Each structure stands twice: as C-alpha cells, then as structure tokens.
C-alpha cells in the first residue's frame, strides 16, 4: 500500500509499503490483470503526473487502485499501485480522503475517459513493425485506460477506406491508426464517401499512433514518434477540429488530403525512388540531393485564391490566428463540398473571382511545389512552420529552380528549424484554394503525390475544407514549429 497525496502537479507518493507491477508492464485488459505481481517498490516522493494516470478504481478499505504510465526517456511501462490518497485544496479539504471520481476528474481534465475506438493496424507499416509496436506499446495503454477496442488489421490497400465507408459509427467515438500516414488518408476518404459523412466527421476523432515510416500526423499533433506516448496523448489530449483539403481532378473523384500535395523534386524523391526502398529512409535525402545538383525544374502554372501576399502578411496572419480557439460551428454538407469543382475543373482562361495566376517566371522554373496542412512532414522536417490547424488556409511553398545550387542546398539544410521559408528563392503563401497545371515537356515522366501516395500527373484543384476533421492535439495546438519565436 502506498500513501499518496494530491498536489498541484500530480500524485505525490509519501510512504511505500508495496506496489504492484502488472505483468512486466505490458498486459493490461482488466481480465489479464490476474497475473499481477507484488514485487517492485515505489520510492517515496515519486510524482505521478495526473496526465499519466489512465484509470482509477476502488480497492479494499477505502484505498484506490491507480493505473498509470511510467515514462522516462526510452523507458515505458504501465503500472498499477494500490494507494491511500489524501486530497489537497485542489480536490477537497487538506488531509481528507480523495475519492475515485475526484482523482479521475484530475486525470481526465481535458478529455473523456473510457472511449470506444476502431484501431487500424497496417501489418506492412514501418517495414512490418506495426503489429509489434501495437502489441507492446499501444494496446497496453488502451487496455489500462479501459478503452473498448475494435481491432482491424488491414488486409489490402484500401481496406481502411472500405471499412470506414460502411461501419456503424454509432458504436464508436474515434479511430486510431497504428500505422504511417497512409491509413489516416484512407480513413478520411472512407468517411468522406459515406452518405452520413457530416455526422461521421462530427462524431469520430481520427488520430495516429506512429507505427509507420511516415508519421507526420503524430509528429505534428502529438509531438512524438513513440507509439506508447502518442497513445497516452490521444487519450489525454484536447480534441481539435482541424482543416482538411479536397483535391479535385479530371480522372479521379474528389480526394480528401490531410497532409500535402507535392510536385517536383520532393515528389520525385518520394515516389520516384520507391525502387530504392531497400536502402531505407536515406533514399529520400539522396533523391532530393541528386535533383538539386542537377538543377531539375518542373514547369507548371499555379493559380491561387490567396489569403496572404508576402512573408510580412504571413507573419501577421500567423500571429493573429495562433491564439484562436478554433472551430465551434457545427458542420454541414456545404462545408464538405468543393466550391470550384462541379464535376469539372474550371476553365483556365476564366479564373473565378478572387483568383490569380502566380508569376510565370517562377512557376515555369519551379523546383518544388508543396502544399501542406501540418508543420512536420517527418522528423526534423519542419516544412510548413506556419501551418495552423484551423486557420482556413492551405500553406503553399514554392522553390524557384533558378536559385544557385548552394542557395537551394543551404535552404534545404534549414528544414529542421523551418528556416528555409525565409530564403528569397522560397515563396510561402497562405491560400484558400489553388490550381496546379503541370506543363512537362512531351514524353517526360514525373510525379504528383497526395499525402505521400502516388497521384496521376494532371491538373489538380485543391480547396480547404475548414474545421472538418476532429483530431487530438497535446495542448490543443500543433507541435511547436518555432515560427512564432522566429517572427517575435
Ligand atoms: N495488408 C496490406 N497490404 C498491402 N498494402 C497495405 C495493406 N494494408 C494497408 N496497405 C497500404 O499500405 C500503405 C502504406 O501504409 P502506411 O502509411 O500505414 O505505412 P508506411 O510504412 O508509413 O508506408 P510508406 O512506407 O508507404 O510511407 C497504405 O496507403 C495502405 O493503402
């Protein structure tokens, strides 16, 4: 039995008799807890942050059984202690007993406990490691938090889309993707194709616990690449309504995109180097480097409905939107429909009101076209530092291919801090919608990628869909990209 008291920062253990360690730390459904051991001691003066407490229930003699996540650097464990907890002013009178409901309320200050979720695990994600990561880091946390889990191991590409198209959404609060970014993309598109899509987007949160090779959603929303920690953040974080993008083209039906669309050097390095998969993630850097050294250009025309004109306006937009609390307006069907696509792309000769073509001198010599909605596209790749979850904007970054090689290389070396956007040969705009018209010479092959997936190289129109996706973020914000500190 542990004596513990409530403090402002968490539960502080006072005096230890014994604690209980569940199954070496990685079991956790209540029924599995039969195998509890009574071995380890918890040192006196240990602080268990409220955020780490995932479940509390009554034990014998007014004591409580408290389950929490213990985490320190790479050490990660789910533990249960039996404690006699006294309260402080924060819960009730000093010295008096704290109740289970009081401690649960402190533990779940920003979220609801005990949700029901669909968990997609893609066995192929992250070079086949996803099932192992799910079993050892994700499942223990969800079980300890008494989540109801409908586990779906994806059996083919498109499985998560099909599943989300027909699943009974009344049974669930959300979807957790134990995968890379491909499964959230599928989940969102499955929901988008439902007849009751307004209700589905309104009801279900969609989050990623990073088990793939590309984990931009978890990095940007939860700030970690550790699946166990990300799962704790999903359970404890704030729910946020975030913008999505809708990609329309001639040959495909409108496609939801939560991450990016890219054409030029990045698309070549990502999709065009698939054959080099065997060398791992470095293939991407090599692909970029080769194309930069070759000064490869990808001519196109780009039309936009802009929100900002230059980097000064971009900074002002960021400052004014950063503190906004987000979308509270209920969703309706109009919010999910494209404004500029009626089954056909609009005519290039007649831009809709408020649209304009970007400078042809730049777009005809472009090296990178990249749009995004999340700041981090990979670890240490802060490509869209000014991205905000629900500013009703798509971030558009263009690299002028006429820049000298050393200038391009220098800007790309600053991707980790998001400082590339301040270089003169890099444009960074906020737009409401855009049109990309690739203009490659006849016979030249290239790539467009949407959320990292291959897309036909053809004209695309992209529109922002404000506040459509319910997701989870640590403090209700994206992981710090450093942009605010930079603009002061
Ligand atoms: N059982 C399966 N067999 C083959 N492909 C699958 C299967 N399940 C899912 N997929 C596909 O795998 C793609 C990549 O998945 P995901 O993003 O989760 O992993 P990843 O390791 O990050 O992938 P990548 O290496 O492509 O970035 C998804 O877009 C999905 O369509």
Image (cartoon, grey):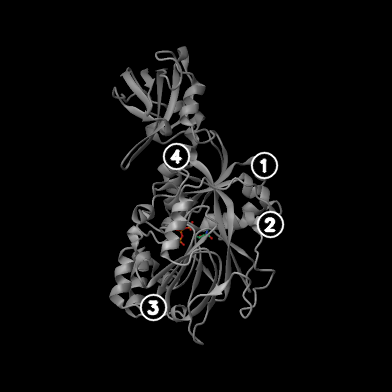
Q: Earlier in the sequence, mark 1 or mark 2?
A: 1
Is residue 25 positioned above or below 127 on the image? above
Nearest to the observer: residue 274 or residue 463: 463
Is residue 474 positioned above or below 391 on the image? above
Figure quadrant of the N terminus: top left
Q: Earlier in the sequence, mark 2 or mark 4?
A: 4
Q: Measured from the top left, where is residue 64 in percent x and y?
A: 45, 20
Residue 232 is labelled as 4
- At numbered mark 1, what does the secondary structure look like: helix, strand or loop? helix
User: Badge 1: few (under 14), some or many (20 or more) residues near its Cα, within 10 Å?
Assistant: few
Residue contact at pointers 1 and 2, CB within 8 angstroms: no
User: Badge 4: few (under 14), some or many (20 or more) residues near its Cα, within 10 Å?
Assistant: many
- As measured in the structure, the alpha-carbon distance from the residue carrying label 2 to the one carrying label 3 is 39 Å
Q: Earlier in the sequence, mark 2 or mark 3?
A: 2
Residue contact at pointers 2 and 3, CB within 8 angstroms: no
| Relative side of 347 to 46, left or right | right
Residue 334 is labelled as 2
Nearer to us: label 2 or label 4: 2
Ligand 1 neighbours mark 1 (CB distance < 8 Å) = no
Task: List the residue tagged with mark 3.
Answer: 401
**Res 342 quadrant in image:** bottom right
Is residue 290 positioned above or below 381 on the image? below
Residue 170 is labelled as 1
- As measured in the structure, the alpha-carbon distance from the residue carrying label 4 to the one carrying label 3 is 43 Å
């Amino acid at each position: 039995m542990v004596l513990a008291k409530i403090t402002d920062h968490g539960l502080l253990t006072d005096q230890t008799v014994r604690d209980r360690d569940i199954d070496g730390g990685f079991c956790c459904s209540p029924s599995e807890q039969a195998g509890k051991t009574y071995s380890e001691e918890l040192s006196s003066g240990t602080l268990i942050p409220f955020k780490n407490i995932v479940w509390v229930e009554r034990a014998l003699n007014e004591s409580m059984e408290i389950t929490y996540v213990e985490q320190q650097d790479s050490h990660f464990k789910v533990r249960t202690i039996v404690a006699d907890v006294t309260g402080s002013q924060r819960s009730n009178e000093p010295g008096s007993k704290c109740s289970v409901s009081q401690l649960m309320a402190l533990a779940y200050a920003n979220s609801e406990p005990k949700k029901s979720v669909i968990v997609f695990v893609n066995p192929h994600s992250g070079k086949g490691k996803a099932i192992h990561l799910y079993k050892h880091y994700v499942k223990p946390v969800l079980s300890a938090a008494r989540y109801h889990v409908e586990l779906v191991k994806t059996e083919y590409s498109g499985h998560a889309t099909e599943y989300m198209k027909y699943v009974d959404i009344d049974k669930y609060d959300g979807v957790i993707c134990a995968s890379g970014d491909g499964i959230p993309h599928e989940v969102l598109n499955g929901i988008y194709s439902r007849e009751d899509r307004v209700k589905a987007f309104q009801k279900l949160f969609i989050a990623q616990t990073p088990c793939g090779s590309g984990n931009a959603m978890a990095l940007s929303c939860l700030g970690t690449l550790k699946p166990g920690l990300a799962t704790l953040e999903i359970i404890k974080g704030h729910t946020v309504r975030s913008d999505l993008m809708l990609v329309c083209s001639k040959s495909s039906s409108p496609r939801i995109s939560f991450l990016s669309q890219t054409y030029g050097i990045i698309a070549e390095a990502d999709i065009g180097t698939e054959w080099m998969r065997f060398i791992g993630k470095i293939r991407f850097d090599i692909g970029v480097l080769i194309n930069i050294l070759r000064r490869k250009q990808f001519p196109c025309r780009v039309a936009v409905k802009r929100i900002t004109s230059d980097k000064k306006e971009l900074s002002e937009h960021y400052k004014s939107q950063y503190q906004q609390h987000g979308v509270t307006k209920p969703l309706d069907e109009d919010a999910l429909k494209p404004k500029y696509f009626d089954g056909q792309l609009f005519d290039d000769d007649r831009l809709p009101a408020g649209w304009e073509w970007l400078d042809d001198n730049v777009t005809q010599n472009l090296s990178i076209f990249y749009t995004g909605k999340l700041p981090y596209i990979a670890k240490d790749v802060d490509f869209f530092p000014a991205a905000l979850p629900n500013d009703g904007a798509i971030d558009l970054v263009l690299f002028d291919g006429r820049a000298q090689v050393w200038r391009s290389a220098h800007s790309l070396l600053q991707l980790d801090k998001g400082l590339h956007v301040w270089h003169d040969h890099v444009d960074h705009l906020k737009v409401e919608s855009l049109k990309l018209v690739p203009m490659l010479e006849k016979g030249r092959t290239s790539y467009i990628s949407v959320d990292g997936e291959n897309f036909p190289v053809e004209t695309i129109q992209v529109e922002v869909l404000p506040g459509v996706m319910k997701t989870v973020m640590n403090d209700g914000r994206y992981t710090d990209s450093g942009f605010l500190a930079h603009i002061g």
